[in-house]
Amino acid sequence: MSTEHEPSGQEHAAWERVRDAAMGMNHHHAKAACEEAERAAEDGTADERQSLAARAELDEWERITDTLSDHAGSYDPATDPFVQGQLTARANRAQAAARRR
């Protein structure tokens, strides 16, 4: 049985930092940023909290790099299907919570 992991506030913040930094980047620039994030995540000097943030940032850079790999455009969260899905899910959860009240 797998345990579902609900992302922490720290992970959400890391994703937002990456998305803000990636805005307007093309695949080449995102790949370079991803490689830099990979070096930072592998650096053994971070404490557990910093390691979690570094891993979340790396995961998001990898996802964005993959997203950009199949088109020649630049990154924009407004056109990122994953981000839009997250926003829709949050809105749906908020509506469901409001109905339960």
Image (spheres, helix red, strand yellow):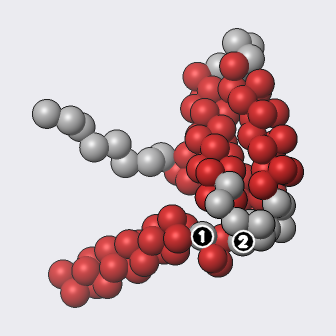
As drawn, the residue found furthest toward the left would be: 1
> For numbered disc 2, what is the local secondary structure?
loop
Q: Is residue 12 left or right of residue 69?
A: left
Query: Circle 1: is it few (<14), some (14-19), or many (20+) Cα within 10 Å?
Result: some
In front of the other: 68 or 11: 68
Question: Percent position (x, y) of residue 87?
Answer: 48, 74
Question: Percent position (x, y) of residue 79?
Answer: 63, 76
Q: Quadrant of residue 94?
A: bottom left
In front of the other: 64 or 88: 64
Query: Circle 2: is it few (<14), some (14-19), or many (20+) Cα within 10 Å?
Result: some
Residue 16 visible? The answer is no
User: Residue at the spot x=44%, y=48% of the render?
Assistant: 7
Query: In which quadrant will I find the N terminus?
Result: top left
Query: In which quadrant will I find the C terminus?
Result: bottom left
Q: How many marks?
A: 2
User: Residue at the spot x=27%, y=77% of the render?
Assistant: 97
> For numbered disc 1, what is the local secondary structure?
loop
Q: Quadrant of residue 16?
A: bottom right
Determine whether label 1 and label 2 are within 8 Å by CB. yes
Q: Quadrant of residue 39?
A: top right
**Is 9 drawn above or below residue 34 in the view shown?**
below
Residue to which mark 2 is pinned: 76
Q: Which mark is residue 97?
A: none
User: Residue at the spot x=78%, y=34% of the render?
Assistant: 35
Residue 91 visible? The answer is yes
Question: Percent position (x, y) of residue 96?
Answer: 25, 80
Q: Amino acid at mark 1?
A: Asp
Q: Is residue 82 left or right of residue 41?
A: left
Residue to which mark 1 is pinned: 80
Distance in Å between CA atoms under marks 1 and 2: 6 Å
Q: Is residue 6 left or right of residue 87?
A: left
Q: Amino acid at mark 2?
A: Asp
